Amino acid sequence: MADPEPFDAVILAGGAARRMGGGDKPGLDVGGASLVERVAAAAAAAAEVIVVGPPRERPAARYVREDPPGSGPVPALRAGLAWVARPRFALLAGDLPFLRAADIEALRRAAEGRSGAVLVDAQGRTQWLLGVWRTDAVRGALADYAGRSLRGLLGPLDPLPVAAEGALVRAAFDCDTPEELARARAAGEQAGGDGS
């Protein structure tokens, strides 16, 4: 099978983290690296990694901000997408401690010939911040979109749903609460600190 098209990665890492009690959720440490560093490492095959959020020393990436900062995922996607130069891009949350390069690769392959592919977790929830998309399709959808919901924006593009089965199950685990962060840290320690 031929390699998928080159891709960029857009990581949304600037939310308010209300369920975490506020603060810098993507900067929280799991297994010796911040959450956003772990996501960027999983996206290392991207031609460019674009982080929408406050600038950081690590990971090395292009940092941009939505206007105004904290205004939600659709403005954040708009800000990141402005810098995407490849025909495809991965759209990723900045709080996925167990995301692996192989997970993004599986989504890239699933998205071939389609507008996109998006992970559906074990509870049947579509993870709009864990997918691979055709850049021109999302740009076209954003051009006339006035809503605030990623589902409202991306759902009509009819992406291929990819079930979180086997090795993909852990990819969908995110850290929205202190309890989820504690689980991720415990799992990282049991796995020798790398969370894999």
Image (cartoon, rainbow, N blue to C red):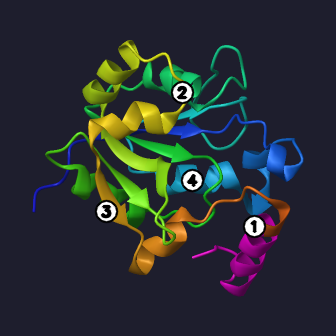
Q: Which residue was labeled with disc 3?
A: 106
Q: Which residues are magenta?
A: 180-196
Asked whether the beta carbons under mark 4 and mark 2 sit within 8 Å of each other, the answer is no
Asked whether the beta carbons under mark 3 and mark 2 sit within 8 Å of each other, the answer is no
Q: Earlier in the sequence, mark 4 or mark 2?
A: 4
Rendered image: mark on residue 39 = 4
Amino acid at circle 3: Ala
Rendered image: mark on residue 180 = 1
Which marked residue is nearer to the observer: mark 3 or mark 2?
Answer: 2
- Judge from the rendering whether residue 64 lies leftward or rightward of residue 167; answer left or right: right
The local crowd at label 1, few if under 14, some if 14 to 19, many if 20 or more residues have their Cα within 10 Å, is some
Q: Earlier in the sequence, mark 3 or mark 2?
A: 2
Which marked residue is nearer to the observer: mark 3 or mark 1?
Answer: 1
Tell me the SS state at disc 1: helix
Q: Nearer the viewer, residue 46 or 14?
A: 14
Amino acid at circle 2: Val
